[in-house]
Image (cartoon, helix red, strand yellow):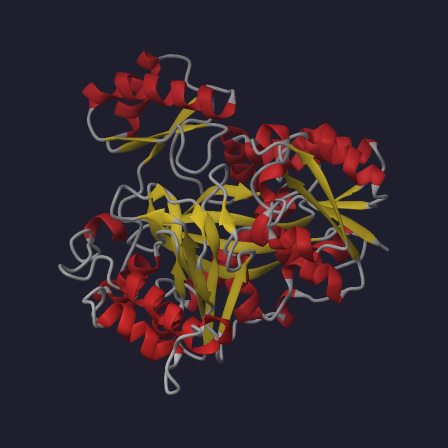
Amino acid sequence: MIKKVLVANRGEIALRVMRSCYEMGIRSVAVYSTADRTSRHVLFANEAECIGGAQSSDSYLNIDHIIAAAKKHKADAIHPGYGFLSENAEFARRCEAEGITFIGPRPETMEEMGDKISARKKMIEAGVPVVPGTEEPLKSAEEAVKVAKEIGFPVMLKASMGGGGKGMRLITKEEDVIEMYNAAKSEAMSGFGDDTVYIEKFVEEPHHIEFQILGDKHGNVVHLFDRECSVQRRHQKIVEESPSPFINDELRKEMGEKAVAAAKAVGYVGAGTIEFLVDKYHKFYFLEMNTRLQVEHPITEEVVGVDLVKEQLRVAAGEPLRFKQEDLSQRGHAIECRICAEDTEHNFMPSPGVIQQLTIPQGIGARVDSHCYEGYEIPMYYDPMIGKLIVWAVTREYAIERMRRALYEYKITGLTTNIRYLRRIIDVPDFKKGNYNTYFIERNQERLQPRSGFKNDAEPMAVIAAYIDYLMNVDENKSQDATEDSTALTRWRAFGLQKGVLRV
């Protein structure tokens, strides 16, 4: 039995893991940087330890500091969350060497599936369809030109150790190959310390569809169905839903079987994701495997009814899976929107700052995974995610209606967020119909622009309303020379409205 878990992460995912630990009677240990001292995950945990400065390299990426904190607090397991060290084989090995259970797959599996060329070979051996392309690293720009011509344009140049769109280039004509090859190698070296690149045939009008899988230490593997992740900007997901509105039950069954085969081919243990590209003809190809929990895992939890973190903990403790494939089914429809502190009107620049006012959506079918609160400062050092808004309903149509309502109800002031941008995404006709692919954002650029005159109206109105409420409910604000019938509201009118300062 696992009795105490150190969560080697921050923010909403750290809090998400700790909540499941609490429900299972497992104590949790938070680690935090100096910039995260007041984060909610630190306040929620049973124990907490500062592991370094604000820069990730000094804290959340510092293996020595994290291992030392785990030993100090006598944690018998470490959950890596997602990002940071979650797919770092060296970290998993260090945990193992120190006698600490790593809640995730074996380090050998991370290495096999983290290298995309190695992963392609494994999938071919397992009978999983892959996109036509090279099976060995490209050795030169000249070889890249030759291979691209053989495969046929357009092609996609990718970094072998890449992720998040880094080291990735779409090439549509021969004269661009050499320039793109050099740029991709440089970006790959800068981002991953490895400049190995390869080429794949570009899949036209692709859908990004992934399957959640779970494996135990006894050789059992199941999938927990699909997620549609095609609403992306520069290969970064913005909105996800489950089930996918694009694939039918027959294709879903086939893809699920291949996802399980892929996981079994590498002896997968824990929660992971098999990602596929599906073209307009409903042909699907293996894209990559993420050997960790995904940001969008809550929508799977909502439609399948399984707490993925609890299953991770049980599997890590050596327990067999508690269900078989035939025990699992999808129920209803779930959608997730990523709420971020970013300025969508200025190239999605991060917008760190202090949250002055926060209204979280409530009501049936609404879930918010977030570590933020009023007065909390979004640090400038990390991903600007504020939280994840997840809705569930019995049908996709009702789920869209619920998400529209929840986004309207979600209010954050003090910094710029992408909430209004998400509202516009939900209202695009192609999204409503489920008729979209990974080109959704660029094909709907005009519709996603703010309407004239509505650029920043919501935030000042929310501030005014919050301040009026404050004045009406705080006795201390009554002035000594106020008249008998004076109230905070009448004084607000006298001071502000009558002088023309504000017009509500």
Query: Of 4 and 436, which appears nearest the observer?
Result: 4
> Is residue 299 shown left or right of residue 169?
right
Task: Say which quadrant the C terminus sits in.
Answer: bottom left
Residue 365 location (% of width, % of height):
49, 76
Query: Of 433 and 380, which appears nearest the observer?
Result: 380
How many marks the image carries: the answer is 0
Residue 326 location (% of width, % of height):
63, 70
Q: Residue at x 41, y 25 (%)?
A: 198
Measured along the vertical axis of the image, is residue 423 above or below residue 414? below
Residue 330 location (% of width, % of height):
52, 71
Q: Residue at x 57, y 42 (%)?
A: 126
Query: Of 310 and 210, which appears nearest the observer?
Result: 310
Q: Residue at x 31, y 37 (%)?
A: 202
> From where the camera sits, is residue 329 visible?
yes
> Is residue 117 shown left or right of residue 108?
left
> Is residue 414 shown left or right of residue 461?
right
> Is residue 344 shown left or right of residue 196?
left
Measured along the vertical axis of the image, is residue 359 above or below residue 29? below
Q: Residue furthest left?
A: 452
Q: Residue at x 21, y 30 (%)?
A: 172
Q: Residue furthest bottom?
A: 485
Q: For residue 502, what is the image quadrant?
A: bottom left
Residue 481 location (% of width, % of height):
40, 75
